[in-house]
Image (cartoon, rainbow, N blue to C red):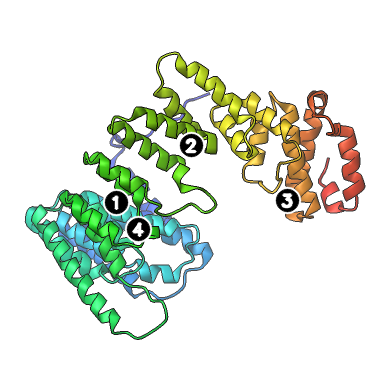
Amino acid sequence: MARKPSLSIEKLTELPAQKLAQLVLDEAERNAGFRRQVKAALAAKSGPEGIAKLIDRRLSGLERAKSFIEWDKARAFRGDLQSLIDTIEAELAPAAPDMAMDRFIRFIATHERVFERVDDSSGHVQDVYYLAIISAGKLAAQLSTSEAALLPDKIMARLGETTHGYLADLTKATAPHLPQSTLARWDAELDAAIAQRKIEEAKISTDRWHYSMTSQWSEMRQTLAEARGDMDLMIALESAKKPHMQDVQGMAVRLLTAGRADEALEWVRKPGSRVKGQDDALSPSRVQIEASILEALDDKSAAQALRWQCFENRLSADILRDYLKNLPDFDDIEAETRALQYGLSHQVPELALRFYLDWPRLDLAAQVILQHHAHWDGGLWHSLPKTAETLEHEHPAAATILYRALLDDILKAARSKAYGHGARYVGKLALLAEAADPFLPEGVMAHEDYMAELRKNHGRKSGFWGRVG
């Protein structure tokens, strides 16, 4: 069979210019996004002013447009937005970074109007704006000192009162590349603006909640403080927040990195924001930070005790790996054996199952499933099918328990839209039956008996049985 020729710049340059031009023209007629890229490349031949003029026309269109974008046109619209920031980055930025930065800021400022026109429940349009922010951050590093000094004013002029959060995001992207004097001036201006806004808001007599820009401006001040290396200001701004709003883990990491381990320990042990239904004090992410801080304070035994306590509570594979890694040679083998055995008696079977899948020890994962064969919730359709597929070849009895739980849930709730999945589970059970039946726990029916019971209880669901081969 003949090998298809691969495309490369070298091979394409071998084609006659007229042939290449015709190919480009043909594709431009079929593809609107590509046509705009070609026009941008042609405009760039006349210098940055030419490409900037073309970009400005497209930005003006975005700023003026009001019509709602129907769902079937949303993908093409997203492609148009992506093409626009690609043009700014690829065509204008290399020739005139300051002009490109102005267009990036102007584009990002269109987000509020755009979000009013499109249903972006998928987040795809938001992604384009985040990509523009990332590109703007990279471009900030290419600005001259005088151009960088003007950046805060340009950002605040376009985005200073926007509520979506992109103002703070753009600040994070650009602040590390700004001169220290510019950062100090921007911080002072934000501090003054916050004070003035609070005075104005205090005069408003209302019991209704209203959004205040001061929280976003305060977040920006923390970003600027971090870029300036002013840890004391960061701490002061974070401490001013309500306790449940404080990023205690983030502050602890920053303080540890700055060599202020004692203060880091105080922060990581604050209550902070909590995960619903969980003890934040033993969350794996928090424990990893606190253990690192304890080691920096030369208290390795306390760090290890905390890791083991967290493992016992959460059965976190990552925490166990950290615990074993910090044990003396050969002690880790005994500790791993003890940990694997401990998981089998844990009071939350779901945590035990996830731990053994993550470790991985599929034999012990199967053992947990069989031990708690009546426990599994077939409504967990986002995780149980994948687990069952992982186990079905080597542990068919455990996979059978999960497939039955999924099937029972579908039929008991008469979820007709899921009957196709249910029929597939019946097929899986039939294939696994011979290998699974001898190893099913006591009290669990063999395959034929289970299917007979299924027909007895759900025989009238013809929509389901019609799908079963």
Q: Could you say where residue 432 lies in the image, as x and y percent from the top left?
A: 77, 29
The crowding category of the residue bearing disc 3, from other C-alpha atoms within 10 Å (few below 14, some 14 to 19, many at least 20), is few
Q: Earlier in the sequence, mark 1 or mark 4?
A: 4
Label 3 SS: helix
Q: Position of residue 364 (x, y in %)?
A: 64, 26
Give the structural element (helix, strand or loop) at label 1. Answer: helix
258 with respect to 123 (left or right): left
Please state which of residues 218 and 267 is positioned toward the viewer in this rendering.
267
Gap between marks 3 and 4 measured at Cα: 36 Å
Q: Residue at x 46, y 16 (%)?
A: 331
Which badge, 2 or 4, comes first in the chain's sequence? 4
Instruction: Tell me which label, 3 or 2, sits earlier in the chain.
Output: 2
Q: CA distance from mark 3 to mark 2?
A: 38 Å
Residue 134 numbered tag: 1
From the viewer's perspective, is residue 457 above or below residue 46?
above
Three-letter amino acid code at the position of disc 1: Ile
On the image, numbered disc 2 is attached to which residue?
A: 310
Q: Nearer the viewer, mark 1 or mark 2?
A: 2
Q: Nearer the viewer, residue 42 or 197?
A: 197
> Which SS class for mark 2?
helix
Report the disc number at residue 418: 3
Q: Is residue 206 above or below residue 156?
A: below
Q: Which residue is mark 4?
A: 129
